Image (cartoon, rainbow, N blue to C red):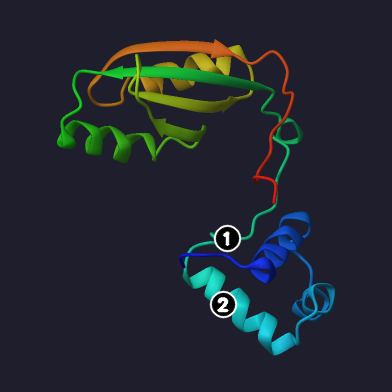
Amino acid sequence: MSELDAIDLAILKTLQANARITNADLAAKIGLSASACSRRLDILERSDVIRGYHAHVSHKALDYKMIAIVHISLSGQFAKTLAEFEAAVKRCPNVLVCYLMSGEYDYILRIAARDLEDYERIHRDWLSALPHVVKINSSFALREIIDRPNVGL
């Protein structure tokens, strides 16, 4: 999908606010018939503009009270090295986000931990065991200011 029109943007904005809205209510809100709205949604989903529908669950409610930002350097940036690291990091259940970076570090991760002892376990059992890692630099979030799941439309 190359370009989103005003109707697509209205659909996306509405779904970002309430992904549980019925198709009939969504159609009425943006001024389409239910069938036209359903076709638009299908196109947005198939073209990967809409990548899924999720509940935004509080980590604190699940007793994950600590967020660590972890910078990782690898031994090199060969395709095989990156692929092996990325396959392994995807298996770590505490990694919330992983970005391949430009600059000083190769990757930045956001990790949820219950407490410092739990982070030590994650560091020991997961991060230190990741292939090709030569440096790990961890910082701990003191307070969350904003966690926007979507960009503003």
Image coordinates for residue 104, horizontal then vertical, percent: 34, 14
Image coordinates for residue 34, horizontal then vertical, percent: 74, 86
Image coordinates for residue 68, horizontal then vertical, percent: 56, 19
Residue 139 versus residue 51 in the image, above or below: above
Label 2 sits on what residue type? Asp
Q: Is residue 118 left or right of residue 87?
A: right
Image coordinates for residue 90, horizontal then vertical, percent: 39, 40
Quickly name the residue at label 1: 52
Q: Which mark is residue 42?
A: 2
Q: CA distance from mark 1 to mark 2?
A: 12 Å
Dividing the picture into quadrants, the one containing residue 63 is top right
Dividing the picture into quadrants, the one containing residue 79 is top left
Q: Residue at x 78, y 59 (%)?
A: 18
Earlier sequence position, callout 1 versus callout 2: 2
Element on which disc 1 rests:
loop
Label 1 sits on what residue type? Gly
Q: Is residue 82 left or right of residue 148?
A: left
Q: Residue at x 37, y 27 (%)?
A: 101
